[in-house]
Image: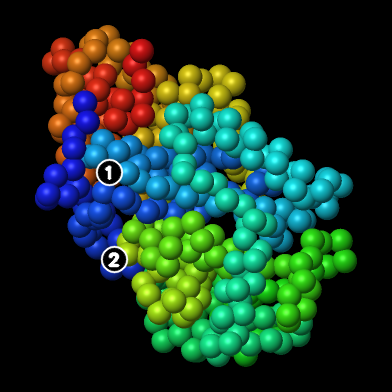
Amino acid sequence: MTERAGEEGVGMHLYDTARREIVPFDPNPDVTLYSCGITPYDAAHLGHAFVFLTFDLLQRRLLDAGCRPKLVRNITDVDDDILRRARELGVHYLDLAAEEMARFDSQMAALSLLPVASEPRATSAIPEILSLVGALLDSGHAYQSGGAVYFEVATFDRFGQLSHLPRPEMLRLAAERGGNPDDPNKRDPLDFVLWQPSAPDEPSWQSRWGSGRPGWHAECSALAMRELGATVDLHGGGTDLIFPHHECEAAQSESVTGKTFSRHWLHAGMVGLNGTKMSKSLGNLVFIGDLLKHWEPTVIRLALLAHHYRADWDWHDEDLDDAAARIDRWRSAGRGEGALDEVRARLDDDLDAPGAVAALDDAASKGSGVSSGAALLGISLS
């Protein structure tokens, strides 16, 4: 059963990172969405799945409301991390990317993520990246130094409009997340690289300011504008991308187009283990592939949906036991549309998946079949 969008629109309310409050999200029926994807140099973990599940849930609710969402999720197939990993393994970086993307796509399909409209690679956008960098240089927003091209944040007076962070915190996060504020070629430590020289064993493309490869932030601006236009309805990813990645994306994009880059910013919280954020550097990752060896994919999906997308939370193996027991109760209740409207209402209230799950629990406990409401969450009870 699909609820068609009428003259009043979708009627959703979502938290907007830039505005720092829950606001109406009521786009036209043709909705443009951009989600930052993975750098395919290692297996997908729970943190990845939680972010992409958030966008899948939004996509499902928009479809249910009669909208036509176009979700683009990029692939960063050239950057420092993938080149370093390929060097360690002694393989070509694109071969590594192809292998990891095949594994990622298989695992996300197992978790019942809907297909995205497109999944473009960074290496597919070199012409668009070159045009972006050239336009920023020509307009005075960028400069050449030490063989690289940098965006000059002083030329964009709205820098910080998304993260709202004080400068010391920006500098700390830039150092932690690859921004290299100590680079002596920069005019300002917060300036960020748009184009950089390649090491001898790294891929390189010709440009009018020298051969090299793109900076991380330039890729997403070029892909988003190529695939969806100058302005997207909603853009996001994990909260670890707010600064510097998304802040820099917005600055360089709006400097070129003079238009709002994204009307709405949505970010999913971080998943931790034993009180610490999961990360490759700490070696505390829980991999989706390992979970799929022992658990029904639907159970894994429901275990993630038990947490609100904006929350930072800790993973516990007991989450899977709880999800498995919940699915058994829902299946025992049989087929039906019990709590379907309540599930819709909860999703419209800042994608409140835990609230939707609770509504289905209540309906099932009263003997109402909840298969339709579960299906809206991407949970098959068949």
Amino acid under disc 1: Cys
> How many marks on residues?
2
| Contact? badges 2 and 1 (CB < 8 Å) | no
Q: Which mark is residue 67?
A: 1
Residue 18 placed where, x, y %? 33, 68
Q: Quadrant of residue 235?
A: bottom left
Q: What residue appears at the point 67 percent right and 40 percent down from the top-left corner? A: 100
Residues at marks 2 and 1, CA–CA distance in whole angstroms: 26 Å
Disc 1, SS = loop
Q: Nearer the viewer, residue 148 or 288?
A: 148
- Which residue in the protein does label 2 denote? 20
Image quadrant containing the C terminus? top left
Q: What residue appears at the point 50 percent right and 89 percent down from the top-left corner? A: 154
Q: Quadrant of residue 371?
A: top left
Residue 206 placed where, x, y %? 77, 71
Amino acid under disc 2: Arg
Location of residue 196 with respect to 110 vertically, above or below: below
User: Quick one: label 2, few (<14), some, or many (20+) residues within 10 Å?
Assistant: few
